[in-house]
Amino acid sequence: MRTWVAPGRVNIIGEHTDYNDGFVLPIALPLVVECAARVRADAMVRVVSRQRPDETVLVAVAELAVERDRVPGWSRYPLGVVAEFVRRGHAIGGVDLELDGAVPIGAGLSSSAALSCAVAIALRDLFAPTVADRELIEIARAAENDYVGAPTGLLDQSASILCTAGHALFLDIRRFVEIGRDDDTNTVAHEQIPFDLARFELELLVIDTGQPHEHVDGGYAERRAQCEAAAAQLGVPALRDVDSVAALDRIADDVSRRRARHVVTENARVLTVAQRLRDGADPRTIGSVLTEGHASLRDDFEVSTPALDAAVAAALGAGAHGARMVGGGFGGSVIALVDRDSTDAVVAAVRNRFADAGFAEPRTFVVGPAAGAHRAD
C-alpha cells in the first residue's frame, strides 16, 4: 500500500466569503488525514478507518449512487470522491482505502475536506494521473456537496490541495473558477504569500473549544441562502460585487443586511491582511483585523457561540494581538496571534475562563503554515 496525506486548514481571515465569490486567506495545518490505498482485482471499494475500527464498508463501484443512503455517514466522504471521479468519466477500478486522521473532527479545521482531498489525490495517482489540481478540488467539493449533502464552498478543498509550507494562500474564488481547469499556476487567481511568524517571535495558537459543528446542519445552509437572497435584492451576481457598506442600505430586511455586511467587510479584511503580509509588515499589525473579523462573525453573521466568544476574550485579555473564531461557526475553534513567550499565559487564561464558565477544558496547540496534499511514502 502507498500513503497519501492531506491537511486541515485555518483561515487567517476570510470566513463565509468563498461561496459569495470572494477572497480567502488560509494556511494548511501540520495536522493531516492519511489515506493508504491500493488497487483491487475486483470492482469493489473497501473503506476502513482507524477512528471506526468496528466498521468496514464494502460497495461495488457501479453501485455507489444507489448505496449512498445505506452506508454510514462517515464513509460518504471517501465514497463520494470515488463516485465523483466515476461521474466525470474517469475509469476507477476497485480500491482499498484505509483512513486515519489527526485533524480534530468538528473543530472548524476542515477535517472533512482533508479526508476528501486525501482520497482524491490517492485516486488521481492510482487511476487518473492527468487530472489537474483545479479539477481535483472540484471533485472533492462535489463529493461533499452532492454525496454527503454539505453545502460547502471551494475554500477548504483549495487550501488542502494548493497551500504550501511557509505561506498563506491568497485565493480569489471567482477568478479561480472562471479561469478554468487548464492553468493550475495562474497567480491572478491564487498567490502564495510568505507567512513567517517565527521571524517576528510570534505563534499562531489554535483553541479547540470542543463544541463540534456540522456543515450538514441547517445553520450553514441558511446563511448561504441569506447571502444569495441579499445579492438578488441588490441585483448583483454575488456579494463580492458590492463595493461599499453604504450600498447595503437598499436591503430592507435587517437580518439580510447584516449578513451581507459581514461578507462585504470580510472581503475587505482579506485584502488588507494579504497586502500587509505581501509588504513584509510585522504580522502584529494584522491582529486588530482578525479581532474585527470575529466581531463581524459574532454580531452580523451570528455564527459564534459563548465558548468561542469566551476564548477570544480571554486570549485578548492575556495579551494576544488578535483572535477570532475560524470555520463555519456554531462551534469549533479560535485562532489567536500571540507573542511566542506569551503562549503559555494565553493558554492558561483561556483554560481558567472556560473553567469559570463551566465549559469543558479546551484543546490548544500551536500551528504554522504546512504543505498541501501529497504522497507521503
Image (tube, grey):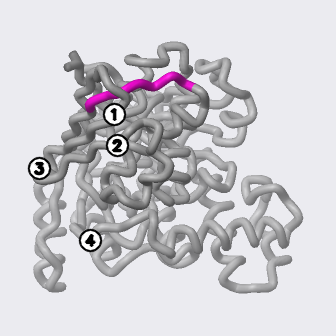
Mark 4 or mark 1: which is in front? Answer: 1
If the image is split into quadrants, where does the C terminus sit? top left
Query: How dense is the environment of label 1, judged by Cα within 10 Å: few (below 14), some, or many (20 and up)?
Result: some
Q: Earlier in the sequence, mark 3 or mark 4?
A: 3
What's the CA distance linking mark 2 and mark 4? 33 Å
CB within 8 Å, label 4 to label 1:
no
Q: Quadrant of residue 92?
A: top left
Q: Earlier in the sequence, mark 3 or mark 2?
A: 3
Range shown magenta: 90-96
Q: At label 1, which amino acid type do we have? A: Met
Instruction: Reply yes or no: does residue 92 show up in magenta.
Output: yes
Q: At label 4, which amino acid type do we have? A: Gln
CB within 8 Å, label 2 to label 4:
no
Q: At label 2, which amino acid type do we have? A: Val
Find disc 4 in the rendering and name its residue.
211
State the predominant SS element of the stretch in magenta. loop
Query: How dense is the environment of label 3, judged by Cα within 10 Å: few (below 14), some, or many (20 and up)?
Result: few
Find disc 3 in the rendering and name its residue.
53
If the image is split into quadrants, where does the N terminus sit? top left
Which residue appears farthest toward the right when viewing the image?
235
Does residue 373 appear in this view?
Answer: yes
CB within 8 Å, label 2 to label 1:
yes
Q: Position of residue 305 (x, y in %)?
A: 36, 77
Secondary structure state at the residue bearing disc 3: strand
Q: Quadrant of residue 345?
A: bottom left
Find disc 2 in the rendering and name its residue.
59
Q: Position of residue 57 (x, y in %)?
A: 26, 47
Q: Quadrant of residue 108?
A: bottom left
Does residue 276 appear in this view?
Answer: no
